[in-house]
């Protein structure tokens, strides 16, 4: 019997802000479905440090900040180096 697939999703700033702001133009049901998969550890959500920084630099209500903070408290975090060992140094 095969193991269930573990999916990886990558969100940019607009998806996180759509979720936090409960924007009607954002696919809220799809966003919640992915978040539920991530919370259940059946999927991984990948975001860049740029996305993280852009979301944090936006002005948020207490509810939005609590949702953002709650997300990061609920999920396992990992970081990866993205520099290339043979890249030219300036």
Image: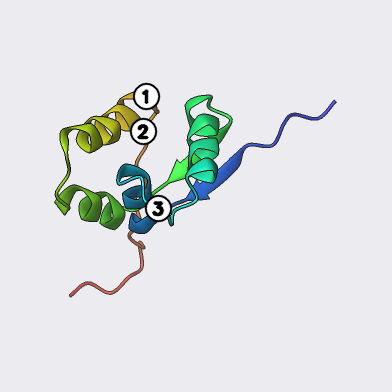
The residue lying toward the viewer, choosing from 47 and 55, is 55
Q: Is residue 13 above or below residue 61?
A: below
Residue 33 is situated, as x and y percent measured from the top left of the image, at 55, 37
What is the x, y in percent for residue 59? 14, 49
Count neighbours of disc 1 (C-alpha within 10 A) and say few if under 14, some if 14 to 19, many if 20 or more. Answer: few
What residue do we see at 49% from left, 37% from top? 32
Quarter location, residue 75 = top left
Q: Please give the residue where the numbered disc 1 appears in the rendered image.
A: 74
Q: Nearer the viewer, mark 1 or mark 3?
A: 3
Q: Dot 3: within a 10 Å radius of its alpha carbon, few (fewer than 14), some, or many (20 or more) residues? A: some
Tell me the CA gap for discs 3 and 2: 19 Å
Q: Is residue 17 left or right of residue 46?
A: left
> What is the spatial separation of the Cα atoms under label 1 and label 2, in whole angstroms?
9 Å
Q: Earlier in the sequence, mark 3 or mark 2?
A: 3
Q: Residue furthest right?
A: 1
Left or right: 31, with 62 as reference point = right
Residue bearing the label numbered 3: 15
Q: Residue 83 or 59: which is nearer the viewer? A: 59
Q: Secondary structure at mark 1?
A: helix
Q: In the structure shown, which secondary structural element does the residue marked by tag 3 occupy?
A: helix
């Amino acid at each position: 019997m095969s193991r269930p697939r573990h999916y990886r999703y990558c969100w940019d700033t607009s998806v996180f802000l759509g979720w936090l702001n409960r924007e009607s133009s954002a696919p809220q049901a799809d966003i919640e479905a992915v978040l539920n998969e991530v919370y259940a550890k059946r999927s991984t959500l990948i975001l860049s440090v740029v996305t993280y920084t852009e979301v944090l630099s936006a002005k948020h209500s207490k509810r939005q900040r609590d949702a953002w903070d709650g997300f990061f408290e609920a999920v396992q975090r990992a970081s990866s180096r993205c520099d290339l060992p043979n890249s030219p140094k300036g």
